[in-house]
Amino acid sequence: MSIPFEHLQWMYETMVKIRTYEERLVEAYAEGKYPVFNIGAGPVPGEMHLAAGQEPAAVGICVHLKPEDTVTAPHRPHHHAIAKGVDLRRMTAEIYGKATGLGKGKGGHMHLFDPATKFSCGGIIAAGMPHAAGAALASKMRGKDWVAVAFIGEGAANQGAFHETLNLAALWKLPLVVVIEDNRYGISVPKALSTAVERNDARAAAYGIPGYYVADNDVLEMYRVSREAVERARRGEGPSLIEIETYRYLGHFQGDPEVYRAKEEVPGLREKDPIRRLREHLLAQGVAEQDMAAWEARAKAAVDEAFAFARDSEYPAPEAALEDVFAASEV
Amino acid sequence: MSIPFEHLQWMYETMVKIRTYEERLVEAYAEGKYPVFNIGAGPVPGEMHLAAGQEPAAVGICVHLKPEDTVTAPHRPHHHAIAKGVDLRRMTAEIYGKATGLGKGKGGHMHLFDPATKFSCGGIIAAGMPHAAGAALASKMRGKDWVAVAFIGEGAANQGAFHETLNLAALWKLPLVVVIEDNRYGISVPKALSTAVERNDARAAAYGIPGYYVADNDVLEMYRVSREAVERARRGEGPSLIEIETYRYLGHFQGDPEVYRAKEEVPGLREKDPIRRLREHLLAQGVAEQDMAAWEARAKAAVDEAFAFARDSEYPAPEAALEDVFAASEV
Amino acid sequence: MATELKQRLLTGNKAMAEAIAQEMTRDPSVFVMGEDVGRYGGIFGATEGLYEKFGSERVIDTPISETAFIGAAIGAAAEGMRPIVELMFVDFFGVCMDQIYNHMAKIHYMSGGSVKLPLVLMTAVGGGYNDAAQHSQTLYATFAHLPGLKVVAPSTPYDLKGMMISAIRDDNPVLFMFHKSLQGLGWMAPIDAAVGHVPEEPYTVPIGKARIAREGRDVTIVAVQMMVHHALAAAEQLAAEGIEAEVIDLRSLVPLDRQTIVDSVRKTHRLLVVDEDYLSYGITAEVAATVAEQALYELAAPIRRLAVPDVPIPYSRPLEQFVLPNPDKIAAAVRQLMAEG
Amino acid sequence: MATELKQRLLTGNKAMAEAIAQEMTRDPSVFVMGEDVGRYGGIFGATEGLYEKFGSERVIDTPISETAFIGAAIGAAAEGMRPIVELMFVDFFGVCMDQIYNHMAKIHYMSGGSVKLPLVLMTAVGGGYNDAAQHSQTLYATFAHLPGLKVVAPSTPYDLKGMMISAIRDDNPVLFMFHKSLQGLGWMAPIDAAVGHVPEEPYTVPIGKARIAREGRDVTIVAVQMMVHHALAAAEQLAAEGIEAEVIDLRSLVPLDRQTIVDSVRKTHRLLVVDEDYLSYGITAEVAATVAEQALYELAAPIRRLAVPDVPIPYSRPLEQFVLPNPDKIAAAVRQLMAEG
Ligand SMILES: Cc1ncc(C[n+]2csc(CCOP(=O)(O)OP(=O)(O)O)c2C)c(N)n1
Ligand SMILES: Cc1ncc(C[n+]2csc(CCOP(=O)(O)OP(=O)(O)O)c2C)c(N)n1
Ligand SMILES: [Mg+2]
Ligand SMILES: [Mg+2]
């Protein structure tokens, strides 16, 4: 399989953007929270789930998506949002709780909604899967070739919504792709203590749909299987299930004591960093260092701009809390 | 595989008892509801889900159970209750809403609880599965070899609880057997419109557990696979999944217009009646007609007695409605 | 000069189905999903005839997977479709409440208004026919307590049609509760209130406006759905004794028309709230609290509440009848109230 | 003669964990299940140290399958075990409400009392730290409305321990709501109320009895959990102005100690109900209705309610602070109430 150059470039640049974004958030989140950590303090309060290390899952499939395609993401949503092309400024402003945010500050980091790129996420395990199926149903009912991608964690594959949605999607041949990011843990619980099978692609058999497994956080393999799955969905042949083995460098949330994993685990994972691996691949393919540096600079500039925009934006007026429960309706 | 004579006898007699019971209920339920059918009228009001034709699922596995083993059943529970040995008199009294009933008239036909035989059922699809898993967990924690059997319909295999429970049970190696009665429909919806796979035994792969399929309502085959599954559970090797193709002679509930199936379907099913087939098998094995007649008579007598008991019992005092919300507790 | 009032009588279920059919004809983005909504026509007849008219593409039977299909309705609505999705009995809410409550009800707010969810979740409520604890509840307050859903509970065929059309056209998620006994089904006890005049042409009944079902000067009875009809029957009994009860049919629990309640109490100075839902933390409490806040000094007697007394709905007929309010109990409560002040 | 009061100070989470540990030691049928309750010690520390003490057989990490493991707790309890099961955030109730509500809460009743379910469902509630709409709710009334569960919500380390022991020993299912901010966790804003005297030996605090957290003669403030502490802070402000507020800590929502409320209002003649849950159809309504029924003529002013104003909990700090009651808002409401009558 040959991968178009612009796809490789896009994946690399987007992974760098994601990584930069998440690292910047580590800092922003820490502001105002020390010396005594207080989850509610600082410019970015509340829970914070970061995805540094998990970039391949997001870019390897989103590279195949169009703006009209839908993505739903879970509580750890930034890599998916960035890969889907969500406006980084308004997304960051939302995370800062500002009036210019995607949700005017009402949603926050776990509840990002961007109708422009058909992206949404939420804080309840596996709950985005049915929404993606519904978008896929709408696409089908309207005769479009739009697909929907639902991202979940490996822990989420044991929630009832997972089963119900895959059955429904397979039954109705919906253009849906479900991507399971196996980052080894659901909070502190390792996969072996949550999941009766070693690999969740085995569960595709329960719905008569294709199941794929991507080992070792391999973005090129993710690219390959995602292309198959997305094309199948576009052709109207129904859903697929992909599990990718991926790495979570940071805690489940910022502030996680990480009592459940060995100290050496993360350094070991970082040695296999997917961004560096793709960089090496690009170098081997003859891409010039300085070209890559330019992409990296562009990614970083976008992140810088987004954080500056967020910081400079105003907070919503307190009374705005009372707005937006209901849409105005003519009836 | 040779089946002990007393097992064959028990299965035959119990199937006859179930069939007789369900047919008697058809009549009792109809009382007071005509000429203008009114679900709330007559001595047996409310919804009524009968299982005539589905006897093999219940007897083929319950024959392997001990009193200490747990059974949970769904909204169509009489065949399981009878096969598990629930007191027929108190069960019938409950269905009649009498004070002598298993639940003093508070539960009704969908909510039969008999701690003596560890039987329970409920009106919510697939909701009994976790209860069975919990009984299995208790058995395991206490070092017992007691098993739990959860019965559900084929429609229930698409409910989230199905997936969550099987994963949990497989993960924890719980002594659980899940029996899916595929009677072709969930109310009016045929299996092909509810289930993405043809046979639910395929779903065992999603949990790494054995899956069995019993075709054509075959009680002897049900006996065989159930023995394997129950023994495996008793040995502490974990859960199994059994799907049995079975037949629902009556409507989903009494009063069902049955617009969703062809007029000739039920007569066709009745031609393969499992009781008659077992009877023929017994005859071929040399069992005397008159012996079988004696068993049948005993089954019918038990049913007669139960209905007489129920009819003769008193209704609870109206104010008893206020009792039993909470157990008295010393704390 | 004789005014001729042409009565076009429909049952509750046919009024609902007619509303849905008219909206499906008008707007191709409207479709229906749920268990047995297709050929069967809905267990409580709310989709009668729709499958024949619009086919299996727009009237979709689902697996018994409420989380998946109600969640899918959310996803489809976010895309601009206008799904009508049925939860067969409200009692089953627990298997899919996350979708209803954390998503359907909150996404508009969390998105700062950028995602609209124009969908109707319809569900059957109510007991009285011995269907026991898991199939007889109304759960009005369970839904009305949680912000983000409009919650309606019409009590007449006229309102069932008009409020269904309003619900479909509303850009917000609307929980449409219909009472089984008011559907006028052939297999339930026939009651007069389940049949009523329903104009053929589409019309809307506003969501959030209570209806004065009967005017009276002595006492205000606030109720919803089946309890409205019981209250009206009680009012007839009481009228014979010279007590004139005003009966308010809330019709909508969110938004709640507090003004109509308070205005009535200002007139009658006595309040009885009747509910088929559980007593504590329910509609009766909210209505009572509203009056205790806004019209305390108007009250000539303590507020009275009549509802299911915080027990699950029992199966056996004498037990169920004991816990459900009925015209006699309502009339007795009013008599007591009149005696008190 | 000096009385020496030895203070043994514990945080809320340690008080809970101590209660569970003592009961697990006393009774081998008690065990704990939930997400991250094992090595992690519970996201909000309710099971801190238990895994180390009792091992993975009795302190069981589960998959993210709330329906399965809460349902399994029901099945195990029916067999005579006494499970303590954790729903990590109350906000997640929607994925498993069927098990909680149609089964856990109803089986004892439906079985005519023959099946007992001695289990504790514990869950974290509360906001104020910007965790937004799906992780900040209290949902007190959502559970209190539905019969069959005892519902407790302690506000001090002393009560957290004593009521947990009561809950474990109770033969009924008890929903044990603990407030995140009152756990005294190292990663939340430190507040004094999250630390308190807790005797080492096991003791019980009865379920169903309110506590007068502060005596006063001018106005009754009824509250629960975090709002009790806000009410006490408001009472301090008000005392400086000569207004003596009586603060009632309900502690238990089911059973609800109506007598203590009514007795207090008989004394103070004014009532403010404060709630971190949504306003409509909530605790404030039930308490107000109770007084409007039982002590109407005692009221010198209309009843006032202060709660989250029927919007989902917003994320951004100024928005969230706007919707949550706090001491200043409570004091302001009391001042207004005093001015009214
Ligand atoms: C229904 C539900 N249960 C529990 C939680 C709490 N929770 C949030 S994230 C998480 C772990 C998720 O694990 P996984 O799906 O593997 O995703 P990851 O965090 O590893 O990305 C849990 C249990 C929740 N948000 N929703
Ligand atoms: C959660 C839930 N959803 C829907 C229902 C309504 N309902 C009762 S029985 C039934 C069909 C069940 O089909 P199946 O599991 O095949 O069992 P069968 O009736 O065929 O024995 C449905 C949808 C319910 N009781 N619970
Ligand atoms: Mg994970
Ligand atoms: Mg079936």
Image (cartoon, coloured by chain):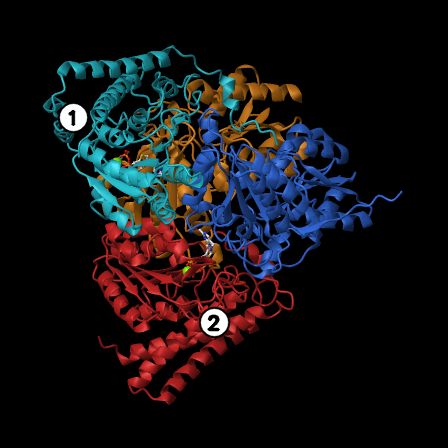
Chain colours: A red, B cyan, C orange, D blue
Please state which of residues B176 and A102 is positioned toward the viewer in this rendering.
B176
Is the residue at mark 1 in contact range of ligand 2, meaning its CB lies under 8 Å from it? no
Local packing at callout 2 (Cα closer than 10 Å; few below 14, some 14-19, many 20+) is: many
Q: Is residue A228 above or below residue C154?
A: below
Counting every numbered tag in the picture gives 2
Residue at 64% from the left image edge and 47% from the top image edge: D15
Amino acid at dot 2: Glu
Return the x and y of residue B135 as percentages of the image width and height: 41, 37
Q: Is residue D200 visible?
A: yes
SS type, badge 2: helix
Q: What residue sits right under mark 2 in the picture? A: A22
Looking at the image, residue B286 sits to the left or right of residue A72; the answer is left
Q: Specify the subunit that label 1 lies on.
A: B
Q: Specify the subunit that label 2 lies on.
A: A
The verdict on a common chain for dots 1 and 2 is: no
Return the x and y of residue C261 as percentages of the image width and height: 56, 35
Labelled disc at residue B278: 1
To which quarter of the image does residue B277 belong? top left
